[in-house]
Image (cartoon, coloured by chain):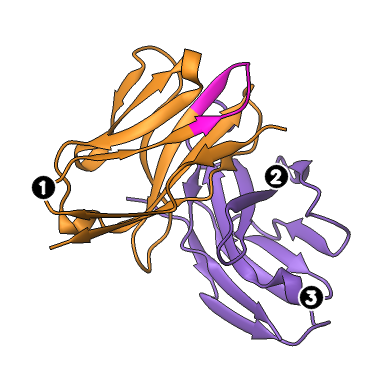
Amino acid sequence: AQSVSQHNHHVILSEAASLELGCNYSYGGTVNLFWYVQYPGQHLQLLLKYFSGDPLVKGIKGFEAEFIKSKFSFNLRKPSVQWSDTAEYFCAVIMNRDDKIIFGKGTRLHILP
Amino acid sequence: EPEVTQTPSHQVTQMGQEVILRCVPISNHLYFYWYRQILGQKVEFLVSFYNNEISEKSEIFDDQFSVERPDGSNFTLKIRSTKLEDSAMYFCASSDGLAGVETQYFGPGTRLLVL
């Protein structure tokens, strides 16, 4: 079945640490890939997206993600996190230009000041 | 920046009651969606809506659910007879193109609690 897996459910880091959140999907065809963030008490916001072209995509707030087709992965990275990055992060995929987004379970990121 | 808005932010209802969750999509968007997130689980697609009809729905979206665009601005999700397992956060989203082409923008959600 088509699915999206996020390996880490909870991540705790200190400020200035580097971040990498894993995301894998199970589908062999065309995909559009997203990372959404949900800050406490707020709605889902798009961090970045990949539709085609350069597999290294840069998003808002210093985040980037790399699409590695051979590994079916789209990991999110940030070289130096801030306390304000505390939030829940969702990897999401649209498969074969379908109409619906399939979300991962989310990773809750907590940054220690 | 335009936003998707949802009302109410929280709703508590008795099992068996009808609820209507309201959404105001971004004004020039044509595609509308409902998702839900049961506590501790992932966000799940419910239904997509375009040109005044459902374009796709998931297995979750059974006969108890319906969607409507009653006027030019609102997009509603009705649950006819709520069950305990309908307790979840419900997110509305909209886009100005097909999901495979354009970004979906999400509302803040309505937290529904069925007692």
Q: Secondary structure at mark 2?
A: strand
The image's mark for residue B49 is 2
Q: Which quadrant of the figure has residue A4?
A: top right
Disc on the earlier residue, 2 or 3: 2
> At 64% from the left edge and 38% from the top edge, which residue is drawn?
A100
* Callout 2 touching callout 3 (CB < 8 Å): no
Q: How many marks?
A: 3
Seen from the viewer's position, the closer of residues A38 and B70 is A38
Label 1 vs label 2: CA separation? Answer: 43 Å
Q: Amino acid at mark 2?
A: Phe
Mark 1 is surrounded, within 10 Å at the Cα level, by few (under 14), some (14 to 19) or many (20 or more) other residues, namely some
**Callout 3: chain:** B
Taking the magenta stretch, the answer to whether it contains residue B64 is no
Range of residues picked out in magenta: A24-32
> At 42% from the left edge and 18% from the top edge, which residue is drawn?
A68
| In this rendering, position of residue B43 left or right of residue B26 | right
**Of the two numbered discs 3 and 1 in the rendering, the one whose residue sits closer to the viewer:** 1
* Callout 3 touching callout 1 (CB < 8 Å): no
Q: Residue furthest right?
A: B63
Q: In the rendered view, tell whether residue B109 sits above or below residue A49.
A: below
Q: Secondary structure at mark 3?
A: loop
Q: Which residue is mark 1?
A: A16
Where residue A106 sits: x, y (%)?
Answer: 47, 50
Seen from the viewer's position, the closer of residues B108 and A21 is A21
Q: In the rendered view, tell whether residue A106 sits above or below residue A69.
A: below
From the image, which quarter does the C terminus of chain B lie in? bottom right
Q: Which residue is mark 3?
A: B82
> Which chain does the orange colour mark?
A
